[in-house]
Amino acid sequence: MTPQRQSYQAGHAPKCLVVIDDSAEWDRAVRYAARWALRGGGSVVMLRLIETEEQNQQWLGVADLMRAEAQDAANEVFDRAAALVTAIGAAVPERVIREGDPTEQILSAIDGDPDIALLILAANSGAEGPGPLVMQLTKTVGAFPIPLLMVPGDLGDDDIDALT
């Protein structure tokens, strides 16, 4: 069971969790999150999910190398996202890297931080659909412990700024 949210209790501040993935529109979610944090006096938690394959014992060295490379790549994307957040004027965002099933890891990140009050994702606006993560999460969103906000991938900076 997810603990009670404490985002607006004394000594706490609201945070939004934003998933940084390989989609072309991830920066839309980050911009929205940064503007939300700036407007509401909160902060941003950036989450990068690394999917791991089942690994045989004999391949652990290769798996460790692949994990290290994935973490390096995650930190490169985090650097770009953090630059966007701070350029908007919000506080330097937290960085979280998790491995495994996306839905389980997102819920675990939320469970682990009672100040997270909102999950923000960007949705692809193209004919191919909103993206695999959005599709996966919409199947369970009714059971999420916090609101989920989806930012359309084709919203421009001015549109996002006007909304936030």
Image (tube, helix red, strand yellow):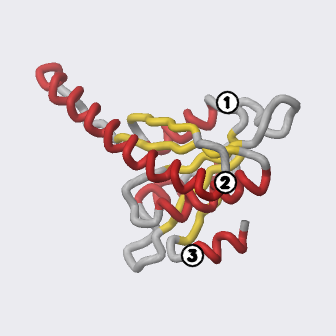
Position of the C terminus, as image quadrant, is: bottom right
Give whichever of discs 3 and 2 has the lower sequence position: 2
Q: Nearer the viewer, residue 80 or 144?
A: 80
Instruction: Give me the disc on residue 89.
Output: 2
Identify the element where label 1 is drawn.
Answer: loop
Residue 68: mark: none
Q: Dot 1: few (<14), some (14–19), or many (≥20) neighbours within 10 Å?
A: few
View extreme (top): residue: 57
Using the numbered discs, state the Cα–Cα distance from disc 1 to disc 3 in whole angstroms: 35 Å
Q: Quadrant of the N terminus?
A: top right
Label 2: few (<14), some or many (≥20) within 10 Å? some
Location of mark 3 (residue): 155
- Give the amino acid at mark 2: Gly
First in sequence: mark 1 or mark 2?
Answer: 1
Please state the horizontal and vertical placement of residue 22, each as a whole percent of the image.
37, 56
Name the mark nearer the viewer: 1 or 3.
Answer: 3
Q: Which residue is mark 1?
A: 1
Q: In the image, what residue occupies the spot 41% across and 40% down?
A: 101
As drawn, 104 above or below 1: below
Q: Is residue 15 above or below residue 111?
A: below
Residue 48, located in which quarter of the rendered image?
A: top left
Left or right position of 25 against 15: left
Amino acid carrying label 1: it is: Met
Q: From mark 1 to mark 2, how far is it between C-alphas?
A: 35 Å
> Secondary structure beneath disc 2?
loop
Q: Which mark is nearer the camera, 1 or 2?
A: 2
